[in-house]
Amino acid sequence: MAVRQVRKVIRILLCISVLVLLGAVLLMKIRRPYNETLVIEAGSRLFSPAYFFKNLDDGASYVTKEEDIDLKHVGSNAIKVKLNGQIYNVTLEVVDTMAPVVTAKDSFNIWSGQVLMPYDFVKEYNDATDVTFSFKNEPDFVNEGEHTALVTARDEGGNETDIAVSYTVIKDTTPPSIYGARDRIVKLNSTVSYRDEVYVTDDIDTDVVLQIDSSNMNIRREGVYEVKYYAVDSSGNYTEKTVNFTVVDSAGEPVAQSVIDEAFNAIYSEIINDGMTKREKAYAIYNYVSENISYIPVSDKSDWEQNAYKGITTKQGDCYTYYAVSRKLLTMADIETMCVKRDNENFPHYWNLINCGDGWYHFDTCPRGQYSYIKIFMYTDEQMRQYSANISEGYYDFDSTLYPATP
């Protein structure tokens, strides 16, 4: 009896052992040993999810979308992988252990006072992560002569590359240029806009301020008055131009500004639409003015806007009228314009110089007799010189020092 009981207990224990062994085998099959964290170099291709499992199981797959795993920046990516229906939460650490590859610029010149940033000394660079640049020394941008800038490139992993770049500081001795300042006729007791069509540029500075001294002007008394335009750049270079403003008494009441604007708004809305580029707007204005005004050899030049209004209401005027009407419409189109005058006081001629954003060009809507078929639209200085030399001698002679050069 006792022997039978012992045998029965043994059989039960054997069954339990088999069941435990089978359970362990099944558990091992369901949930494999895995690596909770792996490290990858920034910029590398994402490796197979099998590497997260110690047996490199080929059946593993990413649950997290691969495009959502950031391999371009140092940091941790919490992702999910899957094997045999079981999902595992793992971490992919992105590191950057390689220093940036940086190519320095060749030696170059800068103007005294010109401030450069560290990146301005770098020709090109390459790294798997973002790179910041800083000066390792305090560069000298003021004193003339040859200098060396030391620049450090540092990536997200803290890896650094240093470069040394030589540069030469040169003193700026070129003064600003003032364009469009010219003798003008203005009406007694009128409002004078001294800045109309006057521009200042500089070969270095982009923020040179145009200064005006009109202290000698007396708009309440007829006469000739000097007005001075001047500008100073950051290097202390000074330039000035003095012109004469002639105040004259003009009979008759001027047309109200609101009336002028209403008349031109009607024309503008008829020929211009918002889908046009500035060049297309300029061309539409050119065609309208040249086709809708007839030439007569006289006009009142004391007020360009009054002249322009008279031009579109009477449909006639001289070259100054063509310039004035064009100027009004071009200004409405936000196109820069200035007046160009022929360099001949006995036979004056006026036309526009315009800038649609790609440089200054000549723009003359006034008819020229048998040569009116030639459209002086977006002409360069050279084309104007050729016209004067080969088509109509001296017609477009002008003092090029008074105006910005065309491309």
Image (cartoon, rainbow, N blue to C red):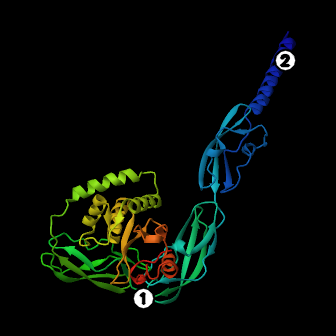
Q: Nearer the viewer, residue 130 or 317?
A: 317
> Disc 2 designates what residue?
11
Q: Position of residue 76 (x, y in %)?
A: 59, 50
Q: Residues within 10 Å of mark 1 (few under 14, many from 20)?
A: few
Is 267 placed left or right of 407 in the picture?
Answer: left
Q: Residue at image x 64%, y 41%?
A: 65
Residue 252 placement: quadrant = bottom left
Q: Amino acid at mark 2?
A: Arg
Residue type at mark 1 is Thr
Secondary structure state at the residue bearing disc 2: helix
- Percent x, y of residue 164: 59, 80
At horizontal 64% and vertical 63% (from top left) the residue drawn is 127
Q: Is residue 170 visible?
A: yes
Using the rendered view, name the quadrant where residue 229 is placed. bottom left
Instruction: Give the farthest residue toward the bottom.
Output: 145
Q: Which residue is at a point 27% across and 68% down the rendered structure image?
A: 304
